[in-house]
Image (spheres, rainbow, N blue to C red):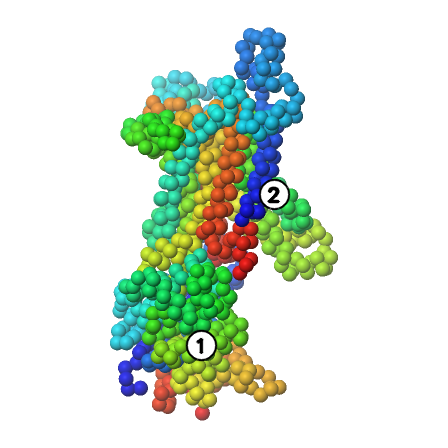
Amino acid sequence: MADAEGTGTAAAAATGGAAAIGPWARFRAEFAESRLAMVGLALLAAIVVLGLLAPVISPQNPYDLAQLDVMDSKLAPGEESATGKTYWLGTDDQGRDMLSGILYGLRISLGVGITSTVFALAIGLFFGLLAAYFGGWTDTLVMRVVDIQLSFPAILIALVLLAVLGQGVGKIVVALVTVQWAYYARTVRSAALVERQKEYVEAARVLALGRARIVFRHLLPNCLPPLIVVATVQVAHAIALEATLSFLGLGLPITEPSLGLLISNGFQYLLSGKYWISFYPGIALLLTIMSINLVADQLRDVLNPRLRR
Amino acid sequence: MSAAPLLEVDGLRMHFFTKAGVVKAVDDVSFRVDRGQILGLVGESGSGKSMTGYSILGLVDPPGRIVEGRIVFDGTDLTRLDPAGWRAIRGNRIAMIFQDPMMTLNPVLRIDTQIVEAVLAHADVSRESALARAREALVRVGIASPDERLRAYPHQFSGGMRQRVAIAIALVNGPDLIIADEPTTALDVTIQGQILFEMQKLCRESGTALVWITHDLSVIAGLADEVCVMYAGRLVESGPVADVLERPLHPYSRGLIDSVPSRNERGRPLHQIPGMTPSLLSLGPGCPFRERCDSANGACRESPAITEPQPGRRLRCYHPAA
Amino acid sequence: MLAYAIRRLGQSLFVLLLMSALVFIGVYAIGDPVELLVNPMADEAERLRAAAALGLDRPLLEQYWSFLQGAASGDLGKSFVFNVPALSLILSKLPATMELAFVAMVIAIAIGIPLGLVAGLKPDSFIGRTIMAGSILGFSLPTFWVGLVLVMIFSVHLGWLPSNGRGATVLVAGIPVSFLTADGLAHLAMPAFNLALFKLSLLVRLTRAGAREAVLQDYVKFARAKGLTQSRVIGVHVLKNILIPIVTVIGLELGSVIAFAIVTESIFAWPGTGKLLIDSINQLDRPVIVAYLLVIVTLFIVINFVVDVLYSLLDPRVRLGGASAAH
C-alpha cells in the first residue's frame, strides 16, 4: 500500500470535502463528471419522451389503415409522393410513414423492456433475499437454479420459450423475465450476504428485531447500488433481445410492431437497395441501447466504491 | 565525507497533479548516501518516504512527476535519464525491495522465471548461467533446497520466505544500492529480526549501500548509520543515527522518539503527538507541523529553511530543542 | 484430478438429463406437427395414421422414455420434415456453425485483447478513450442490425462480398471448411465479423479492466524495479495475470457465440445449426429442436470442462481436486 501514500491522502481529502454536501448531491456531481454519460442521459430522456408522446407528435397513426396510402409505398426518405406528401424517413411496403412507425415502435420497445425489467427485478429481488437471508438449502436450491440458467445464453432460453409459448406481448415479457430474473437474484444475494456478515446486522439480530425489519431496513438498502447498475444494463439487454427475437419472427406479432419487427420487415427490401425501411429503425434502436449503456457505465463507476478514486 | 557520495538527492520535489489539486508528496528533500552506508528514512505513512524511494528508481507513475531537484547516482543525474537509461540502472545498480512480500512476487510466474528475468535484463548470459546465479542468490538469503524452490510458485512460500526471494532478486545483480521500503513491516516479529539481521550482514559483506524506509525508529536504531526524518513530504531533520536519537532537535523527531515504548519508563503514560498528519492537498505555506507542535508561534507561518546547527546535522525548524 | 473429473461428469450428466426433460416437455407443447405435415384435405383416419407413424399418439411420458432410450444409443428421433435422423441432420450442419463461431472468436481475441490492453494502459489518452467509446458502440449495436448494415454496405452498395451462403468448401479431415478457399473466405468474412463484434467489445472491456487493475499491483512495480523492458512487464507480468479471467470468459462465451450464431446465420443464410433451428421452430420440427438443444447443452458442458482445465493450467493457485494440499 506504500505506493498509495500520496494519492491516498489526496483522495481522502477530496471525499472528506465532498461529504459535507450530502450523498445525493455528491452522486449527481460524480455522475456529471463524465460528459459522455450526460449526453447519454439527455439522449435517453429525449427518447423516452418521444416514445411517450408518439401518438401526439407522429405525422400519422401508422396502424390506422385508413391513413395509409398504398400509392405511397416504399418511398425514399424526402421523396415527394404522388399525393404531395413528404415522408422524411421514407415509407415501408404498405405506404406507412417510417418516422411514425419508429416513434410507435420506440414506445413498444421501451414498454416491453421496462415492464420485463420491473417484473424480473421483483422476482430476482425476492429470491435473492430469500437465499441470502435463510441460507442453507434454500440458498443452495435457488443458486443452483440460477447457476444452471446463467450457464445458458439468454437468447437460447428465450428462443425455446417463445417457440413453446408462441407470439404476443405478454409472452415475450414472460420470456424476458425468465431469462433476466437470475441476474438480479445473483446480484442481490451476493450484496446481501456481504451485508449480512457485517456487525450491525448481527447487532440487529441480537436486539431481536423482526425479520422483516432486518431485511427491509438493513439488507435491502445495501443491495440497491449494484441492483440499480444491473437493472440499467438489463433494460438495454431486454430491448436488444426483444428486437432480436422479433427480427427472427419469434417475438412480437405484426400487430404490435416494435423496432425489431420494423427492421425485420425491411430486411427483404434491403437487397434491392431500399435501405431506409430497416436502417432508420435500427438507428433508433441503436441510440436507445447506447444511451442506456452510457448511463449504466457511469452509474457503475459512481456506485462502485472499489473504483472510487 | 570527502569522497563523492554514491547517491546524492538534492532538493527533490515530486508532485502529483490530481483533479482535486497538486499533492506535494515529496517537497524539498536532500540527503546523501556513501558507498556501503546505511541510511534510515523515517516518517509516518503519508510523509512521502516511499515516494522518495520510488523517485530514485524513476518508478513514479502519472499523475506523479519529479518537478525539481537532482538525483545524482555515481556521478549521473538520474532525473535526466531517458527510459532506457533508467532501465539499465534499475535492478542492476539500484535495486528495490517492497513492503508486502505477498504482493511483490507475480503469483502466476515461477520463482526461477522471476529471478532469471532479472539477471537476463542486465547481463548477456545464457539461461543456464542465469539460473545458476539465481540458485546462488537463493542460497545466499538462506533458502534451503534452492533447486526445488526455484521451480515453485510464490503461493507455495510463506511471507518470510517470499521476502527472502525478493531480497535474493534485489541482490542477484550485485547492486551498489538497495532501497528497502519497509520490507519487514508485514512480517511476524521473529521473522522481522532475522530478515533485518541478514540484510545488514549481506550489505556489509558486499559493500552495498542501503536506504531503509520505515516508520519504526527502533529498527533504525540498530541498523542505520545516518537517519533522515520526513514529515508531510519534507525533510525535517537528519544526521548520524546515534546523535539524532539521543538528542533530537526537531519537535517532530522528539515526539516520534518519545512515542516508542521501549524508551519510556514502565508505568509512565506513553507520549503521543497530538493531532493528525495534515492532508498534503490542502497544505498551505508555513511549517506543516505547527498545528501539532508545542513550540510553534507566529514565525512558523513562514516555512523554515534547512539549517546546519551542528556539523553533519541538518534541521528545518525555528525552535530547535536545546 | 480424476476424482474431480468423475464428479464433474456426474454433474454434467444430471444437467443433461434435466435439460432433456425440460426441453422435451416444453417442446411437446408446440402446436401439432400433424397439422403441418398432412394434407389439409386428409380425413381423420389419415391423420391418425400419420400421428401413429410419428409416434405422436402415445402418452407424453412414454414418448419421453422411448426418447431417452433412443438418446442413450445416439438416436434422437427423425426429423418430421426431412425424414432423416435428427442427430445426423444437426451434426451435418454443425461444422458450418463451429467454423463461424471459431473464426468469430479468433477475430474477437486478435483485435479485442490488444485494443483492451492499450485502453487499459493509457486510459486517459485520446486513443484509450476512442477505444472505450468504440466498445460501448459495439456493445450497443444489436447483432442483427449490424448484419443488415454490413449487407447493405458490402453486398448491395459496394458489391464486394456475397450476402448469403457458405461459398466453396474444402474437406479437412473429412469436415467441410470455408476458410481455406478464397470464395469461402469472402462468404465467411461478413458473418464472422458480425458475430465477433459483440464479443470483441466485451474482450476490450474485460482486458482494459484487468490491465487497469494489474498495473497498480506491486508485482508490476517490482517487475519494473528489476529493470525489465516495458514489453516484458506488459507482455509477461500483466498479460499472464489478466489472461486468467479472460480465458475463462472466452471459454464461456464460446457457447454464447454458438447460440448467437442463430441470428447471424439467419441473416447471412449460413447453412449451420442456428438457421436449422429457426427453420425447425417455424415448421414445428420437434425432434430437430430437441436434438439441437441437447447437442448444444452437451457442447456447453464440454466447453465448461475444458475451460476449468485451462484455468488450472494458467493459474498455479488453482489446483483441481486439492492436489496442492501436499505443500
Report whether B72 appears left or right of B49.
Answer: left
The quadrant in which residue B271 appears is bottom right
To the question of a shared chain for discs 2 and 1, the answer is no
Residue at the bottom extreme, as displayed: B322
Q: Which residue is mark 2?
A: A144
Write the residue at 60% across / 34% down.
C17
Report whether C181 appears left or right of A190.
Answer: left
**Disc 2 marks which amino acid?**
Arg
User: Mark 1 falls within which chain?
Assistant: B
- Badge 2 vs badge 1, beta-carbon distance below 8 Å: no
The quadrant in which residue B142 appears is bottom left
* A2, A303: nearer the viewer: A2
Q: State whether residue A94 appears in this view.
A: yes
Q: Position of residue A159 (x, y in %)?
A: 52, 30
Report whether B80 appears left or right of A308.
Answer: left
**Disc 1 marks which amino acid?**
Glu
Q: Residues within 10 Å of mark 1 (few under 14, many from 20)?
A: some
Q: Position of residue C86 (x, y in %)?
A: 51, 24
Q: Secondary structure at mark 1?
A: helix
Report whether B260 appears left or right of C106.
Answer: right
Image disc number at residue B137: none
Q: Secondary structure at mark 2?
A: helix
Q: Which residue is mark 1?
A: B198
* B283, B133: nearer the viewer: B133
Write the residue at 36% across / 86% down.
B307
Write the residue at 39% across / 57% down.
C237
Asked if A215 appears above or below C148 in the picture, the reply is below
Label 2 vs label 1, nearer the camera: 1
